[in-house]
Image: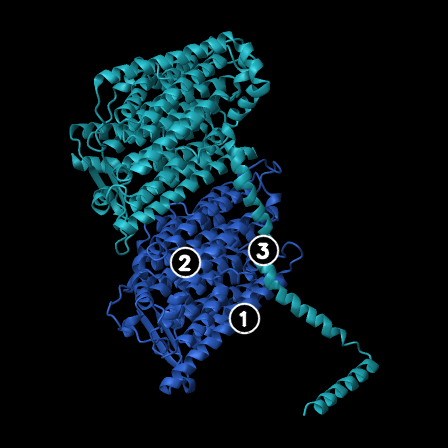
Amino acid sequence: MDLSISLLLPLTFLLPLAGTLILSLSNGRLGERASATVGVTSMGLSALVTVLIAWQYIAEPQVYGVTLWRWISVGDFQPSIGLALDGLSLTMLGIITGVGFLIHLFAAWYMQGEKGITRFYAYMNLFVFSMVLLVLGDNLLLLFFGWEGVGLCSYLLIGYYYEHSENGWAAFKAFVVTRIGDVFLAIGMFLLFFELGTLDIAEILNRAPQMWAEGDPTVELAALLMLGGAVGKSAQLPLHTWLADAMAGPTPVSALIHAATMVTAGVYLIARMNGLFLLAPDVLQLTGIIGALTLLMAGFAALAQTDIKRVLAYSTMSQIGYMFLALGAGAFDAAIFHLMTHAFFKALLFLSAGAVIVSCHHEQDMRRLGGLWRQLPLAYAGFIVGGSALAALPLVSAGFYSKDEILWQELATGHGGLLLAGMIGAFLTSLYTVRLIILTFHGKPKSDNARNAEAGRGLVHGVPLIVLALLSTFLGAWINPPLENVLPAPAEGEEFWHLILELAAAGVVIAGIAVGAWLYLRRRGWLAKHTSSGWGAWLWTFWNHAWGVDDLYDRVLVKPYRGLVRFLRSDIIDRTCSLFAKLAWLLHQGLSRTQTGKLRFYATSMVAGATLILLALALVP
Amino acid sequence: MMLVWLILIPFIGGLLCWQAERIGDTPPRWIALGTMGLELLLTLWLWWSGDFQLPEIAGAQASQWALEFRAPWIPRFGIEIHLALDGLSLILIALTGFLGVLAVVCSWKEIIGRVGFFHLNLLWILGGVVGVFLAIDLFLFFFFWELMLVPMYFLIALWGHSGTQGKTRIGAATKFFIYTQASGLLMLVAILGLAFAHHAATGVYSFSYDELRNAPVSDELAMWLMLGFFIAFAVKLPVVPLHGWLPDAHAQAPTAGSVDLAGILLKTAAYGMLRFTLPLFPEASQAFAPVAMALGVVGIFYGALLACGQQDIKRLIAYTSISHMGFVLIGIYAGTQLALQGVVVLMVAHAFSAAGLFIMSGQIYERIHTRDMTQMGGLWGRLGSLPGFSLCFVAASLGMPGTANFIGEFMVLFGTFPVAPWVVAIASVGLVLAAIYSLFLMQRVHYGPAKSDEPLEGLDHREYVMLLGILALVLFFGLYPQPLLETSGAAMHEIQRLFTDPALTTTILPTGAS
């Protein structure tokens, strides 16, 4: 049994890598169909391999390790290209390859007729390769390999439509902002290796409790640095600004990278390093606070967006905020469970949004959509199912079960403040979800693009939406990630209070939906009036700009940086050094003036010189 | 004798190229290619057959070398033709051979005037560099150090491009020459000072590496002599503020010149520090290490900030070299085994990635006849597979895992952390700046709206194979750096031992400081 898992495990990322290599070495010889076939097939095979692995794992759950080769070997520094499969990585692997395959498939419909399909699938496959490495790596350096790799692919795919400079700059911003987080993670690795002498994750978790007592400053620092990395990748405060702009990429990319997989890598990292974070209670506390602030900030921002994808982007931030909230309470398994259901329903929402966008001739401004439910029934169904999961509609949706688990853990561990933030967030979520659906699908079409919407056809379009829709209902919540042996057990509490909490949460969600429906169906005019004047308008702009953080960074960081670059541009140090050359040149100029060629001048200066020397001789005793 | 041939082959090949010009333009190219190919093959054969896992006997310096050649030159002053090869020099000579082949191939169509003389200069530079990597008689080392300078001057002055703001190629060449010449003189003074000190103590003149390592020198004198060596190497590396020659020389040299400059000439400086500065003056270097590391950090930031502000694509790449060499400097002066081996990997990796970037900008220049990035933009769809290669080299230069640059940079940082955590923490910020300047390049050259719809000529087979070859090596050493690490391991261990544990040697009287 063990043998075949160790054979299969590398295939999960080698197959997508093979896809990338075939596509990138084809040098433009492959047509649209062939490229899509290669891209989707490699992904499908990888998903198939994952199924085989999962099947064997469930028969015999244990940690499977495969070391492919020793990567670097210098003294104690012995990171390997080694994989480790446990319940947590299997869960992530399933999400990545499963959801990834559906999105690859859908992309074949979404991207038809676009230029450079080969490039698109090469990047997408490379992304899956890196993401799988990230979750399978058994040491931090290999994890970092995947971590940076997904960042690069995210950059490449955000900037996929390169002809528009602003897409390139959005990609640029995404890469640079996340790299700030990556630097924290890197320093964290340096620190951990220095203190513990190993980069192997299992070994770190093993040695850390022996090395440090709970709350030791060093372990707090190490955990804080890890958190820095996680915050950057998962678009949490204060490094969240890149995600909304990242929507410049094709919609399947947003679904795969910026909703289902890459942005949740930070959650994975913290869950993976749970032993370290449990030793650092202050940092864990901070994680929860960051999550709470982000989910509220993003929730309000999502209320004031007009672009259908930006609403979803802010909702992603907000949902990852929930995951951080769970992590902060030490409920790692609740975070991973929500990560999974979120991957299903957010992928569904993005793909449905993609269906709307393509059907409406690339119109994605909600003010110009509307009334689409009749023309695009499948996309509408996708939004209804995905939206109800996002808003955590009680009992029927997957989101309800995972979000409920998070809130319950907050209560059971006595994190009252975080629970309150989660409750407010739940209200906001249902409010903006209702707004999103009503503005897009109800009312009257507000532009020709919306009036002439053409529904997508075919299996490639339909199957991913239907499968994801099924997974976003309570069916998805039945999938029980095998996390028992990897993550600490969830906190226990009295079932009575759990029931009360469930009722309260359900009440909040339904209230949110009701208020939303009332506001956006009945009081549209009233709302429009109040958001276009006075402090309502101010609030709208403020939330539309996501609390002005971008403008703040622009002023505090970007402008000074550019100023510094401009100041230094001509290489001031070099100029200073060139003063010697200038000096020599001036002396040369001065002396060559004396070479006048006039006999009278030479004679005079000779006499003057001689006189001076004589005088000097006479004066010096 | 093998070692002598390694040096002689490029010189002889150069002369042949020069004469072959009489026949036509093509023979010199083929002769040069054959010469460098032979050089590379010989080195690889040495690598294959040699054993670089050297005996680790403390204090037994006699067995430090894998191959040695010794013949008297000026016996009166104890000057010898003393060549020796260990893992470090072997790697760098192999690199020289490889980049030599690349330099010949990438100038195949670029250079059309005085082809024979061009290749004479090119090969003589490489011959000089090989000499630098092999000589362990200090006088001989200085000889080769100066020797590689002159042909480089001609390469820039005769086949270079004029720069922006009315900078001429002659100006760039002269600046390069004066900087390196002046610093070389400092090194000569330091070498002579050391030899005289040795003479004063023992009554024998010697320039031998092994002898001079044991020369008794007072602390103060050792510091001055060390500075003499350091400044000479610092100019070449280059260390800010002594970098002034580099952007001009890089930007205005022909592609082959830039490839050699960034790929190997800068490495001679790092090699010099590793081979001479640290082992000859371990305690003075130890005392100087904080300053050197601080200079390294300054270099990382200064180079990265300036790279962002450039319009000339080759100047941008030149400044990135300054930034990368900052990591090298930090690693050298951290002096741990991990950091030193990281330095070796980083040197090789930077040679590949910088060569790739320079070749790429040369190819862009051949097609659109400008190096000004404001004139570019939107080249992605117009250049065939060139932009894809650019992307890969840009990723390498920003230290993406999977490339050798990542291995080098991170080994340096991991290795330096125990010695100087704050230096590492600050230097790591350089990784963000590296992302900024690298992606700036992509954004301004390849993305954005196209300036014209006219398709440009794609890569021909020569160009494609060349870039693919470099890329394959970058990725290979990124995933499996072990060949480099094993070969350089023993040599680096020796340096680390001399540097961090000077008590084992009797080089210098102990200082009170450390």
The circle on residue B221 is none
Task: Tell me the subunit letter for badge 1.
Answer: B
Tell me the SS state at disc 1. helix
Which residue bears the numbered disc 2?
Answer: B330
Q: Which shade of the palette goes to chain B? A: blue
What kind of residue is marked 3? Asp
What kind of residue is marked 1? Gln
- Location of residue B224 (image quadrant): bottom left
Q: Label 3: how many residues lie within 10 Å, few (<14), some (14-19) or many (20+)?
A: many
Report x, y in % for residue A455.
47, 14
Task: Tell me the subunit letter for badge 3.
Answer: A
Relative to B12, say whether A451 is above or below: above
Do marks 2 and 3 share a chain? no
Q: Label 2: how many residues lie within 10 Å, few (<14), some (14-19) or many (20+)?
A: many
Please tell me which residue is depicted at 40% across the width and 79% down the height of the picture.
B207
Task: Tell me the subunit letter for badge 2.
Answer: B
Q: Residue A176 versus residue A431: which sits nearer the camera?
A: A431
Q: Earlier in the sequence, mark 1 or mark 2?
A: 1
Which residue bears the numbered disc 3?
Answer: A571
Which residue bears the numbered disc 1?
Answer: B181
Report x, y in % for residue B240.
51, 60
Do marks 1 and 2 share a chain? yes
Q: Which shade of the palette goes to chain A? A: cyan
Please tell me which residue is depicted at 20% across the width and 27% down the height of the picture.
A55
CB under 8 Å between discs 2 and 3: no
CB under 8 Å between discs 1 and 2: no
